[in-house]
Image (cartoon, helix red, strand yellow):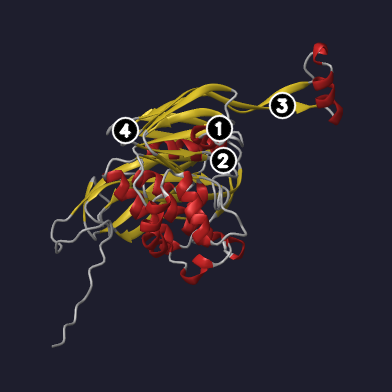
Amino acid sequence: MGSISVKQLGKAYKQYTNRWGRLAEWVLPALGPRHRLKWVIEDINFQLAPGEAVGIIGVNGAGKSTLLKLITGTAQPTTGSVHITGRVAALLELGMGFHPDFTGRQNAYMAGQLLGLSVEEIGAYMPEIEAFADIGDYIDQPVRVYSSGMQMRLAFSVATVRRPDVLIVDEALSVGDAYFQHKSFERIRAFRKQGTTLLIVSHDRAAIQSICDRALLLDRGRLAYQGAPEAVMDYYNALIAERDGANVEQTTAADGRTQTSSGNGLATVTAIAIENADGAPLEVVNVGAPVTLRVTVAVHADLPRLVLGYMIKDRLGQQIYGTNTHHMGRPLEQLRAGERVEYRFHFPLNLGPGSYSVTTALTSSETHLADNYEWRDLALLFIVMNMNRNEFVGTSWMEPAIEIAR
């Protein structure tokens, strides 16, 4: 089984004030350096135990791809070290290592040899590579005529035709069609069950939370936060809002999960509850029961516009359903400091049995990235139980009417 150890890893590039600086530094080294160092990533430390799955997230330019290049050895670090045990398969930049004038089959042979496979082994695996890539006759056409999705299909098929000890995947899967993404993640999940160590970069919250044991957040080249995937993704959303002046806070909820909140505090949620038809608050709800989500908001400053949004998540933090008053055509305008607003959302709770949470957002538009008054994860926790419905599985209750003809 494979493992990864990253210690004090850093990567810097030399920057010169003008085009003659580099030449002067080479010709007259005694005069000292003419450059300054631009650090892309700095002082990164983490470890992946055998069989562990870790996701890396961060905004574009945070250093994610550079970090993976350093880990896989396609770039050399300025400081620190990387130690990997086991056989590694990496899928980084789309088509990396593919020659555009060679056919897909020829490139598959070359890429397979780079992964440590012999020509005979690649030949034996080729029918499986072709079947999984599913690009038909294009396998014998030059790669230059491939779409980005076809390149990704072939690259992933070759990299994963034999289960690696360590699998490293960058954003490449995001260019594929929905069917192939589903098929690829099923293969990754199967590898995980068999003990493969996984390091994946993705902006797909559901993928990170469903596959990974832990997540790392890179921000401006540094490791800003690491922990449970749900907590890191919530912190990531809050961190984006913080760039516009919002404060980020984290506390531990009653069930031990990390609660993240952010915002400038110009409006806040003061009360939230799920109620039955009589207005009584509920902590345990029957599958499909009609409920009301009541949210009370206090306005602390004059606001030109107010939008309330909510998101229901399952116990893993995966998003089940969300909406806001902007999308519903019910925003409020010209509010005064000191006002109190009560919202009531009525709906049947067609969820499967399990533990759920509600996230609330107060903004001026459809997203919290502009005028983030308050964003609060785990604002409400509740449990859904199947008290009197037919047995079913899943997170949604969609019981059908059935007709059978013989």
Q: Is disc 3 in contact with disc 2, using a CB cutoff of under 8 Å?
A: no
Tell me the residue that label 2 is attached to. 59
Q: Earlier in the sequence, mark 4 or mark 1?
A: 4
Q: Nearer the viewer, mark 1 or mark 3?
A: 3
Tell me the residue that label 3 is attached to. 14
Question: For the residue carrying disc 2, how many other residues have a C-alpha within 10 Å: few (<14), some (14-19), or many (20+)?
Answer: some
Q: In the image, 306: left or right of 45? A: right
Tell me the residue that label 1 is attached to. 219
Q: Position of residue 269 (x, y in %)?
A: 44, 40
Q: Residue furthest top?
A: 30
Amino acid beneath label 1: Asp
Q: Which residue sits at x=37%, y=44%? A: 209
Q: CA distance from mark 1 to mark 2?
A: 7 Å
Q: Earlier in the sequence, mark 4 or mark 2?
A: 4
Tell me the residue that label 4 is attached to. 50
Amino acid beneath label 4: Pro
SS class, disc 4: loop
Q: Earlier in the sequence, mark 1 or mark 3?
A: 3
Q: Quick check: can you spot residue 358?
A: yes
